[in-house]
Image: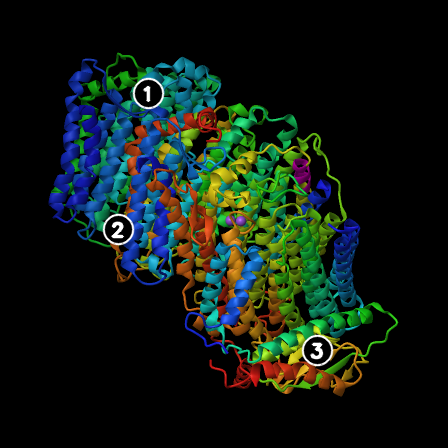
Amino acid sequence: MSLWVEALISLLLITGGAFVFVGSLGMAHLRDFYMRLHGPTKATTLGIGCMLVASMAYFWSVDGRPDIQELLITLFLFITAPVSAHLLAKTGLHLRLKHIDITQGKPVELRPEEVGKKPVPHPDKGHG
Amino acid sequence: MLSIALYITLALVVMALLMNLYRLTIGPDLPDRVLALDTMYVNSIALIVLLGLWLNSKTYFESALLIAMLGFISTVAVCKYILRGDIIE
Amino acid sequence: MTLLWIALLPLLGVLVPALNAQRSRMVCSLATALLPAIALLLTLMQIPALLEGEALRFAVGWLPELNLELALRLDGLSLLFNILIMGIGLLILLYAHFYLASDEPVGRFYAFLMLFMASMVGISMSDNLILLWLFWELTSLSSFLLIGFWSHQSDARKGARMALTVTGAGGLALLAGLLLLGDMAGSFSMGDVLASSDRIIADSRYPLMLGLVLLGAFTKSAQFPFHFWLPHAMAAPTPVSAYLHSATMVKAGIFLMARLHPAIADSELWTVVVSLVGTATLLYGAWFALFKTDLKGILAFSTVSHLGLITVLLGIGSPMAVLAALFHILNHATFKAALFMSAGIIDHETGTRELKQLGGLKKAMPVTALLTTLAAAAMAGVPLFNGFLSKEMFFTETLKTPVLGGLSWLLPALATLGGILSVAYSLRLVHAVFFKPAREAPPKSPHEPPHLMRLPVEILVVLCVVIGLLPALTATHLLDLATQAVLQRPLDFKLAIWHGVNLPLLMSVAALLIGTVLYWRHRDMRLFTRQFESVDARRVFERFVVTMGYRAEQLLTAFEGNSLQRYMTLLLSAAFVMGVIGLVQVTDLTGAAGNQPIDGVVILGAVMLIFGGIATAATHRYRLISLLMLSIVGLFVALTFARFSAPDLALTQLSVEVVTMILLMLALFFLPQKTPQESSPLRNVRDILLAGSLGLVIASLNYAVLTRETLSISNFFVENSKPGGGGYNVVNVILVDFRGFDTLGEITVLALAGLAIFKLLNRLRLFMPHSDGEGRVWSPDRYPAILTSVSMTILPLALLVSAFIFLRGHNQPGGGFIAGLITAVALILLYMARGVEWAQERLDFPFQPVAIMGVAVATLTGLGSWLFGYPFLTSSFGYFTLPVVGEFELATALLFDLGVYLAVVGATLMILANLGKVTTAHRPVTEETEKNAETSATPTSKEPR
Amino acid sequence: MIRSRAWLPTPVFSLLLLFVWLLLVRSVAPGHIVLGGALAIIIPLLTNRFWDARPRIKKPLLLLRFVLRVLGDIITANFEVAYLIANPWRKLNPHFVEYPLMLEERFTITLLASTISLTPGTVSANLRMDGKSLLIHALNETDEEALIEQIRERYERPLKEIYEC
Amino acid sequence: MELLYAMTTGVLTASGLYLTLRGRTFPVVVGLTLLSYAVNLFLFSMGGLTTDGAALVNEGNGFADPLPQALVLTAIVIGFAMTAFVVILAMRARSEVGNDHVDGKKEDRE
Amino acid sequence: MTQHLIVLPVVVPLIAGILLLYQRQGMVRYKRVVSVVATFALLFVAIGLLNQAASGEVTYYALGDWQPPFGIALVLDRLSALMLLVTALLAVGAVVFACGGDDEKGSNFHGLFQWQLMGIDGAFLTGDLFNLFVFFEVLLLASYALLLHGGGKARIQSSVHYVVLNLAGSSLFLIGVGILYGATGTLNMADMASRMAELPAEREGLVVAGALMLLVVFGLKAAILPLYFWLPRAYAAAPAPVAALFAVMTKVGIYSILRVYSLIFGDQAGNLQALEQPWVWWLSLATLAAAGIGVLAARDLRLLIAYLVLISVGTLLAGVGMRTPEATSALLYYLIHTTLITGGLFLLAEMIGMQRGKPGTRLVKGRPMVQGSALALAFFIGAIAVAGLPPLSGAFGKALMLNAAEGSQRLWLWTLVLLAGLASLIALSRAGSTLFWRSHRGHLSGRPLPRCQWFGMAWLLSSSLLLVVFAGPVSNYTQAAAEQLANPSLVIDTLINDAGGPQ
Ligand code: NA
Ligand code: NA
């Protein structure tokens, strides 16, 4: 394996690792749920993407034939990550999670039709 | 060089996972925990990829693929649960 | 062979009345009498042979392991008893024919009676200890049926149960005793046992054995203090009482003592115990007979008393005492049967057995009065009646025995006292019923019974008199044979009415005189005894049984508690104890192989797993959070498998993990979202300690195994995977080939789970909460649009991946199971995104047939090898070449794996989709939100639905 | 436009599946092409019934351009977000933006929402139930109008052209 | 490494067992699931821990013992079937009995 | 076909199950025919196998043509043949009974029934420890499903305990098997037994731990004292034909104890020989005591029978605990008797309950029964048999057991067996007199019971008489089986020494 290839792979790996790290860092230290959502959605996805590319490059150079299987994982991630982020955000809104005060924009109120009827007490005490 | 990069990356991923665990533990709310778990799933793909590089083996490719697919589905299930209670309705 | 017929005929006789029950009573009675009559005849026909000293035996093997033979004997003792049993039995049949009311099921009655007769004959003829016991218990059972014959009466039911319980308990003791006895004698054959007296008595277990055997005998013969059941057994119809309590059942105990006499009686212990118990019974029974006001009650207690008398004689055990005992058995049977039947006639004719309602009956029933008086005289031991003879012999023997040493005068004195009481109650019986005017009017106006009903009594009374007058002529041969059997040697004796004036005669005279006086003054005595009479044995017994049941229930409730927690604690404690016992024998926990070096990733995995495990437990009260923690564990278990070179396991674990999560969440919706704090801190500490200790044990065992060299058969699998199984993936080859049988079982389990869950979901009514655990109303957005469209995209990709994983399984990680789960999960995603109704419409195949088809495919693949003469599940594979495609491998294992795939898909969908379906139809949604949900699910109306 | 046939309802999609198959098996041996081809035909036939309405790509070239643009944006977006997250001194201005949708079909809305989530500092948080607007959370945004305009021009219009017009 | 592995199985076992000792169905079910994870790890390790073994017979040697792997696979599937059953049984029990106690208590104490 | 005879007890019910389960609904007649025919076929197979085993030769069937110890082998000896026959006899009674209408009270009865048979037969045949686990799970899951057949609160409630305990038990099973594999490196029981001889000392403790863990599991299935609690309610709640079949389920546990410890820890095992013995012995006695109390406490006929099952468990395990060929032979005789009779009694209880209407099998005053006399006769016979009274098989079984005890064992066994017998006697006479004698006066109402039910019940109860008449031949067989069992080298030689090695 040539030095350049090795350097490229190493770079890709470390970049990927850094993105993965940053994504999780954002998730760990940002101050409200909606902000924390951004890290994993974008940075982590890209980080994994980088590592997968590194892996592709590595096996390509080791086996001597193009091997781009990892693209499939990337494809999956790119399809699913935004959807899980969307659903999570929706969940957050549904639970009326607090956002930090400096958040601008319209208040994150759901419209009346997006809120169900008044809660009904459960007849079975065991529930909740 | 590659092995050093591998070590560094591994360290980064391990730290990322520990941060996921931190968020998963402290919450404070359910969506935070779910997010942390989802991220943990994705980060473990990194772990698998690194393991493959380490062992010079593509044996673990499917595991990574499955994590990508199934991690998503469990996140969907939990979100649906929080939103609607009944996940298959 | 004749012996077998003698024993068998009464037994076959059970069927006769059962078959003839529908015919007229006359036919039924006659038919029933036929077989025992023949048997009696056959028995009598053996007398010449017996007199010539022949030993009559019959034996065929039955259960050699238990030394049980169908062995019969007919000696003098059996002869005596057979004659009593069948002779009196026939008389009873005649009597019962008239006694029972016309609407009573006489067929059943006769069947019970014949069963009883057969078992008594069996006891009398058994030549094997175990066989004896079999018949012994059979008498308890058949007497239970007879006593409870009038089952609509509470007295009858209770009396029957009491009799069964007491005699049954005795029977169990007897079994133990007989087993011991057989063991001591080295044989269960009666002949051998009777010949091994020395060995038996020298054995250290002799007292125990004797106690057990006597327990059996005493309970059966109603000896004090086990006598209490007998009076209550009088609830039976009178023929039963007459039969069971004069001639047969109660005599079984006596018979046993007589039968085993040669083997076990030659000891001080026997003499003391048996004669003391007998004496106590003699007096106790006589005393209470004096004060009973029920006719049958008097007879019952007098029976107890006379049985005591016989027991005393057997206890004394001298040859003449044995003779006296046997003679009294014969005499008692005659007069007591006669008296019972008379009592029955009186009861039958007057409608009552209460003394106060009876009186002056000699006018209405002169013949019966005469017969009863004669029989009672025999019972009282009046000279010229048979009872006098045996009682005289009894007095003689009590005078001779040295059993109580210096207190030897006590026994004759007590015997005389018994005689006095006997005279008194006999007198009372006759006088009160026939001569004294009645205090109250009886329910019916009495007259004489039909003549044939009285016939048995007449016969018996005649016997009493004839034997009493001509003992030498009538009874000598029979008694000679019987004593010879009991003593195992001939005895020279002469039966005579007159022995001259001697002490026994004086005792008899004294008994008659004082007894008369006593009856005259008995009213004062009654006042005196009233103070002691308060204990009602039946009530005590009933209360005892009820209390025992109640206590048992209490104990059981306290012990079992219906608490899973307790059962679980016990199970885990058991596992802990067992593990510790193993561990203490592991000398060095760290084995020779030692530890491998550790690395960061492993530490991370361990941290995650340990944290996840503890967190799952710690957060269990917040159920969803606990589930999230659980899925950390699931994920890292999969990663651990990957880390330690098990990709198949990692894949399987991952897919199972997701399905499990979905399942748990599906269920959680219908369960409380939180667990209230309910365990006490102490309880928690206990649980933590228990769980922790067992965890420690498991960890230690795990460590001990891990640090030892592996010595496995696995090399075989590795070597044969490709050449023998046709695949590079050993794990898969093991699953579908080497151990395909396991996998077949495993998919059966999976299909079964689907079927079982389908059963659980059938007609399941669930309350669907309107809000989550915090009281928030559910989001009205049932099917978030973005999820909906993504699920469409993922499905085909997932199917492709699933096909890929399936096809490569044999050579690469993968296989039918994982592929099946991926397919199922992708379809479930569709259910989640679009709802059951929508998905069901498009996924129109039923799941159960798919799952079953999976099992079928796997099975048929296995069966296919039969065609080639190989065992079930033998695989084969080959390489084929097709144009364009090139060479490829086909293996039957792939077909097997297809079965696995189908079973997994079918079963998983059966579980998840059916569970989803439960909630679809009746989810409580208001119309308004329903409409909104609809529009959100389909934002534009242009889309076809 | 390729006419759909009964046995091959979605040729483009089938091609994609064949491609994915070849990726999976890491081989272009004829056997695998035959097998993959078969699967690429069978699977759409099996799953066809699950599509309410199949999205029809009307301008494939435009789609390619769109994909490349989004990929580029993803990369820049990530560096931006990484910088925002990693720099503790930077003051963030989170912002909720209600984005009025022009698109009507669910599939295209999904594409747009995903694109928004993957690109600069925004996550699509909620699709209103009437399907008329999308709630977006921006990590650091002060100008609401500019954001709406940027999304509209950069992503929504191309999507509308590719699929819906 | 073996020590750490054994500790992990031990802790997982203990956590699962603790949950199975709770008085409500759901924690018990979760406990059983956790327990089966622990048991699978335990069973898996009975062939020893192979850190860099080949997965396939044609990929050289240093094989992880395949037999325990096959056993664990079967155990996972059976465990899944059992968990599925018991979880739905818990639901059904609640619908029939009205509460989710497993300790024979008749009513809720809340 | 004859060379495949050994695998048929698994394959026949498996295929029958497939045929029955393919369609969920309808085809009642077809399903009944298939199920009954399959069960009778199983009976004939079992008779054939018994015939084969009676010669004393141990035969095995290497599944997939992989020879032991590598592949899974089904092993046929006298013991397993006997168990198969008992199961088939019981199954015929239960399945015919079910055709009287119980099968239609829920879905998939016959299919589940067949698969339960498959699980039971597999457990009796397999020579592989892990395969035993798999068959345990098959029979357990089928039993869970069958237990729920017909629904109802009591069934659900009792099955929660039953299922959860058994799940925990399954985990322990895996741990036990795992340790034994880790310590010996094999799963085939005969192979494991042969390795006991030269087991390194440092592994002995591990083997002990594994073996005793398994003892806990088997004890749970067999329902030995601290682990029996799941049984009474579950059995009492189960639908009659299922409860009848369950009568053999505790015997699977007992069989496993007998098989595993006599083979693996037989005389070749040196220090480890008979390591289970003290536990089994003392706990079985305690079980007897507890069951005796339960019998006295039971206020329902089904519960009473369930506790009678428990008495039989205690008695049988005491036989196992004595660990002599005589005791084994005695317990096998008793096992045949108790399995068939308690099964028959469960069926009878259902019939009585149906005729009594509302009070069901509760021991309270009820209405008189239409077919009261016939039922009373059947109850009398069943009660005599189960209480161990002459002249039926229970008495023989009990006497054999008592006779097999040696020395100081007698004191305990005799006392407890006899007291338990007395408790049964008291309870059964109370139950019988309440059910048949203490009825309300009044008109007889209700319909006569279906013929199938009479057949099924009579089929099982009549076995008691046959066991008495043929006591000699039966006990000869059990004696031979016990001797074979006491000589593990037979199995080891056949499976390992003569056949072993890769092919
Ligand atoms: Na596989
Ligand atoms: Na499997």
Q: Which residue type carries mark 1? A: Ser
Q: Which residue type carries mark 2? A: Ser
In what element is the residue under mark 2?
A: helix
Q: What residue did someone put label 2 on?
A: F373
Question: Which quarter shows the C terminus of chain D?
Answer: bottom right
Q: Is residue C373 magenta?
A: no
User: Is C206 situated above or below C672?
Assistant: above
Cα–Cα span, label 3 and label 1 = 91 Å
**Residue F190: x %, y % from top left:** 49, 30
Q: What residue did someone put label 3 on?
A: A96
Q: Are marks 3 and 1 in contact (CB under 8 Å)?
A: no
Mark 1 vs mark 2: tell me if same chain. Answer: no
- Foreground: F241 or D105? D105
**Residue C861: x %, y % from top left:** 39, 47
Q: What residue did someone put label 1 on?
A: C189
Is F194 on the left or on the right of C26, as rendered?
right
Magenta segment, which residues? C699-706
